[in-house]
Amino acid sequence: KAGVTQTPRYLIKTRGQQVTLSCSPISGHRSVSWYQQTPGQGLQFLFEYFSETQRNKGNFPGRFSGRQFSNSRSEMNVSTLELGDSALYLCASSLDRDGNNEQFFGPGTRLTVL
Amino acid sequence: GQNIDQPTEMTATEGAIVQINCTYQTSGFNGLFWYQQHAGEAPTFLSYNVLDGLEEKGRFSSFLSRSKGYSYLLLKELQMKDSASYLCAVTGYNQGGKLIFGQGTELSVKP
């Protein structure tokens, strides 16, 4: 069974640009969550999508948005990039059924904003 | 609000036992996860505790006390490959896939 995949793995952008990151969950998993990981702040929850709807949201500005497609694949978008957005962006999927909400993480997308 | 505390770093010797503590304050607590993350890699699932008590899984065990807002991860027969960051994360009731993570404990295993 294939794991969670994320593309691209590495990305370099400049301030003011926008970026779209993609996540394909494990087959059959209905929930996809996004996290930002930085050395100073650790792993912080961005948002979660379930059945194409945003189910939970973290405390990030509106520049961070996402969506989920009918096949459970998810994308997140960051507009008007700032230097502080440089981070590892992790996506996690879970079955989320019968109390099973163990999250499986993808390898992440390393975003560098110059 | 939510607050999760764990030590920043720990050092232990190969073959020994180490206990990594995690304390949390959160409303609507549902369960607690432990993840392992090697440098440059994604976090991997270690354990999930919902009820009080100890859950054992091979060399790793995890304990939870809901009344005390406390958990620990116990690693036995330490190996060099156990050097990694250990992340404690809590999930709230009806919060689905939303995990709130602690800052992580960087464990160094020395020969």
Image (cartoon, coloured by chain):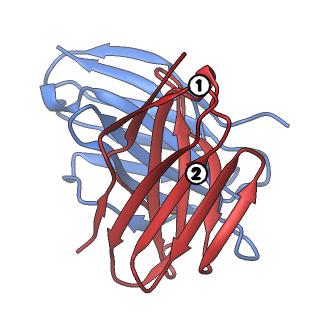
Chain colours: A blue, B red
Q: Is residue B3 above or below residue A35?
A: below
Q: Chain of mark 2?
A: B
Same subunit, tags 2 and 1: yes
Q: Element type at marker 1?
A: loop
The location of residue A32, given as percent across then percent down, is 57, 53
Precedes in sequence: disc 2 or disc 1: 1
The location of residue A40, given as percent across then percent down, is 20, 36
Is residue B26 something that shows in the picture?
yes
- Badge 1: few (under 14), some or many (20 or more) residues near its Cα, within 10 Å? some
Q: Quadrant of residue A77?
A: top left
- Residue receiving disc 2: B74
Q: Is residue A100 above or below residue B79?
A: below
CA gap, disc 2 to disc 1?
14 Å
Q: Quadrant of the N terminus of chain B?
A: bottom left
Q: Element type at marker 2?
A: strand
The location of residue A101, given as percent across then percent down, is 65, 64
Which residue is at the front of the view, B62 or B4? B62
- Residue receiving disc 1: B14
The location of residue B14, given as percent across then percent down, is 59, 25
- Badge 2: few (under 14), some or many (20 or more) residues near its Cα, within 10 Å? some
Which residue is at the front of the view, A107 or B73? B73
Q: Residue at x 55, y 59 (%)?
A: B33
Q: Residue at x 42, y 67 (%)?
A: A56
Is residue A82 something that shows in the picture?
no
Q: Quadrant of the C terminus of chain B?
A: top right
Q: Are marks 2 and 1 in contact (CB under 8 Å)?
A: no
